[in-house]
Amino acid sequence: MTVTIGHTADQRTPSRADGPAVRLTGIGKTFGTGATAVTALRDVSLTVRPGEFVCLLGASGCGKSTLLNLVAGLDRPTTGELALATGRPSFMFQEPALLPWLDAGRNVELPLRLNGVGRGARRQRAGELLELVRLEGQGGKRPHELSGGMRQRVALARALAATTSPDESAEGGGAGSGLLLMDEPFAALDAITRDVLQGELLRVWQATGTTVLFVTHDVREALRLAQRVVLLSSRPGTVVGEWDVEHGSGHDLHDEITASLREVITRHAA
Amino acid sequence: MPPELTGVDAAHDQPAPAESANGAVRLDDAAAALAGLDALDTPTVSRAPWWRRALAVGLPPLVAVLLFVAVWQALWAAAFWPEFKLPAPVTVWREFLSVVRDGSVWSILWTSISRAFLGFFIALVIATPLGLLVAKVRVVRAAIGPLLSGLQSLPSVAWVPAAVLWFGLTNSTIYFVVLLGSIPSIANGLVAGIDQIPPILPRVGQVLGARGLTGARHILLPAALPGYLAGCKQGWAFSWRSLMAAEIIAAGPLLGIGLGAYLEEGSNLNNMPKVIAAIFLILIVGIGIELLVFHPVERRVLRARGLALAT
């Protein structure tokens, strides 16, 4: 099944010209060879516009993480083509994965440091990003002195440091403002924190104009966050449905997507 | 959908904090909810005042030492054993004072401690790249990994006869034995430290673009630091203990008088107070280095990572 590019212009983002931020064409990924080979992804085609927020939704075994790894360049697809308009995308995991020997500020600085940004510039940038995630003044704290939600926000700031640059975080950043890959980043948080952080992520996304590819198990989360929800089937993973989210149509869409998801899952009941 | 805690549809609203009439920044609802959550969730750590911590750390060992001396004194007073086997604590103390007064204790200590330190630092320089290789290169691990662990269980005193035959009664013999005692411990500590790194951290390094040596410097080595430090601590203990073994067995004019030779001298003269004073000196140096060097470093490293909060 092939998915075409942005059918309807979405009102939620300032329209951005240029090509897609991410274009996957007929992506397939097989692990191993011969009888033991496992096909994780088959013929996945997907296009993400610059600045768009797309949720990949699917049950276990739909190859969501494999797909993100491919986009992140951590792995190579077996078949198909992958094109990114941005440089190295940044990644957020289910756990904050902060380096425990660095304080929050230095964790945010790390990607800048690895890119050879000078000390003064990176300190300033880290300060700005911490302020963006509402952690101003907390840069001197160690990860273990922060709560789970705060750690995940530091991780968000670090991911933004890796993929955006200061001048692009202004209004309507365009294709240059980076790509953020998120692998169920809120799944390990308690319900209240998750709820608050979803709101925070939307605010930060609006403020930075970053393109987001967000993987989740949760239909409700996908509907709350995404402009577009893409449903993947399981084993092998392939795109089986796609919905543009317009706010207000929440309930119907929720039921519709849940029904499709149920269909995908029940297919595996032997 | 039901309303969300912080207003989902905040996505459509203006997210920035609003300015209130008097110019001060007023937190909007989402920010307030977040600030409240942060305040509730942040782990709190309360610490006892310094004198109480010092008391808790210092008092138990002091009491233990006093008890030990008291028992020793009682055993001596009961005269179970002849005087030349168990001297009185005060006799040993006098022997100790005599070497302190004539100043020979400093040269004895310096001879041994400088050797142990030099040996330990050479061992560090050799063992660190060795440990990295064993941890990260599969072939190297398969080839010498077991040997490295095996060497750790081989008492390095077993090398002394061979070393004496190879190098004679020189400093080379001493350093050879010290190195063979401490290198396996340090290298094994580093290997264990690297093996215990949570797999997520190298992945973070990968997605941030830290590969090869940059990755080792920014991710691998700092992440392995606690294990590495434990290895260094053990490596120091092994190098100190190997040094004593070497000094006791290999005595000669070229070697000078270290703690081991001092002990051996006491033994040759049937001078029990001297022997016991030497043993205590060896113990005190070992404990002193541990307390003055390794313990503070290790505690700092662990505390910075939120491990070992108690002490």
Image (cartoon, rainbow, N blue to C red):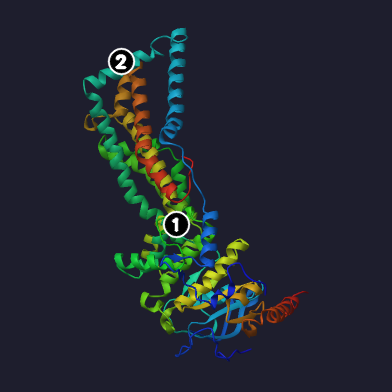
Q: Position of residue B174 (x, y in %)?
A: 30, 37
Residue type pointed to by label 1: Ala
Q: Position of residue B116 (x, y in %)?
A: 31, 38
**Coordinates of residue B91 in the picture (x, y in percent):** 34, 13
Left or right: B102 in relation to B198:
left
As displayed, is residue B83 above or below residue A215? above
Left or right: residue B166 compared with residue A239? left
Q: Determine whether A109 is above or below B78 in the image.
A: below
Q: Chain of mark 1?
A: B
- The reply to whether residue B165 is in sight is no
Residue A87 in which image quadrant: bottom left
How many numbered discs?
Answer: 2
Where on the picture, by quarter, is residue B30?
bottom right
Q: Nearer the viewer, residue A208 or A27?
A: A208
Q: Secondary structure at mark 1?
A: helix
Q: Which mark is residue B94?
A: 2
- Mark 2 residue type: Arg
According to the picture, the residue beneath numbered tag 1 turns out to be: B135
Looking at the rendered image, the quarter that the N terminus of chain B falls into is bottom right
Residue at 25%, 29% (x, y): give it. B252
Specify whether residue A59 is in view: yes
Helix or strand or loop: what does disc 2 sit on? helix
Residue A262: x and y, percent?
73, 77
User: In the image, is A222 to the left or to the right of B254?
Assistant: right
Q: Earlier in the sequence, mark 2 or mark 1?
A: 2
Q: Residue furthest front?
A: B21
Mark 1 crowdedness (10 Å alpha carbons): few <14, some 14-19, many ≥20: many
Labels 2, 1: front one: 2
Residue in front for this viewpoint, B46 or A108? B46
Q: CA distance from mark 2 to mark 1?
A: 51 Å
